[in-house]
Amino acid sequence: MKRIVAVLFVVALAFTMISGCCGTKSATTDTYSNCMDKCQSIEQSCTASARAAEAAAMRAENAARRAEAAAEKCEAMFKRHMKK
């Protein structure tokens, strides 16, 4: 008898859960749409930030090359003056 009551309880719980999920489908779809919109906007901002960071890194590398070239030029001038 206890098994029958337990099985009926589980079946009733399953139907309740299924009906609850089916009843909130439109709300779930709206939430999903909002979430996807937010994810796409975040992805776009991350892509823009990555491009900006890449451009900044390239500018920094170019500045480092120019600084290194200037340092080598100064070192060469210093060595020339030391020889005199």
Image (cartoon, helix red, strand yellow):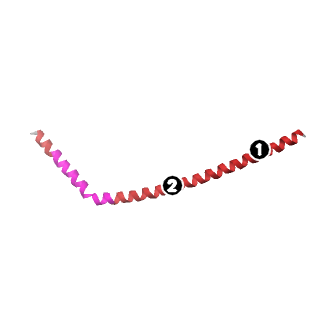
Q: Which residues are magenta?
A: 9-29
User: Residue 72 lies in what quarter of the image?
Assistant: top right
Q: Nearer the viewer, residue 22 or 61?
A: 61
Q: Nearer the viewer, residue 31 or 73?
A: 73
Q: Position of residue 34 (x, y in %)?
A: 38, 59
Examine the rendered structure and indicate whether residue 81 appears above or below residue 47.
above
> Callout 1: 10 Å neighbours few (<14), some, many (20+)?
few
Quarter of the C terminus within the rendering: top right
Q: Are marks 2 and 1 in contact (CB under 8 Å)?
A: no
Q: Nearer the viewer, residue 67 or 2?
A: 67
Which residue is at a point 43% across and 55% down the rendered structure image? 39
User: Residue 3 lies in what quarter of the image?
Assistant: top left
Q: Is residue 70 left or right of residue 43?
A: right
Which residue is label 2 attached to?
Answer: 47
Which residue is label 1 attached to?
Answer: 72
Helix, strand or loop status at disc 2: helix
Q: Is residue 64 left or right of residue 47?
A: right
Query: Which numbered disc, 2 or 1, marks the residue that appears first in the sequence?
Result: 2
Mark 2 residue type: Thr
Mark 1 residue type: Glu
Examine the rendered structure and indicate whether residue 64 appears above or below residue 45.
above
In the image, residue 63 lies in the stretch drawn in magenta: no
> Callout 2: 10 Å neighbours few (<14), some, many (20+)?
few
Q: Position of residue 40 (x, y in %)?
A: 44, 57
Helix, strand or loop status at disc 1: helix
Name the chief secondary structure element in magenta: helix
Which residue is at a point 83% across and 44% down the rendered structure image? 77
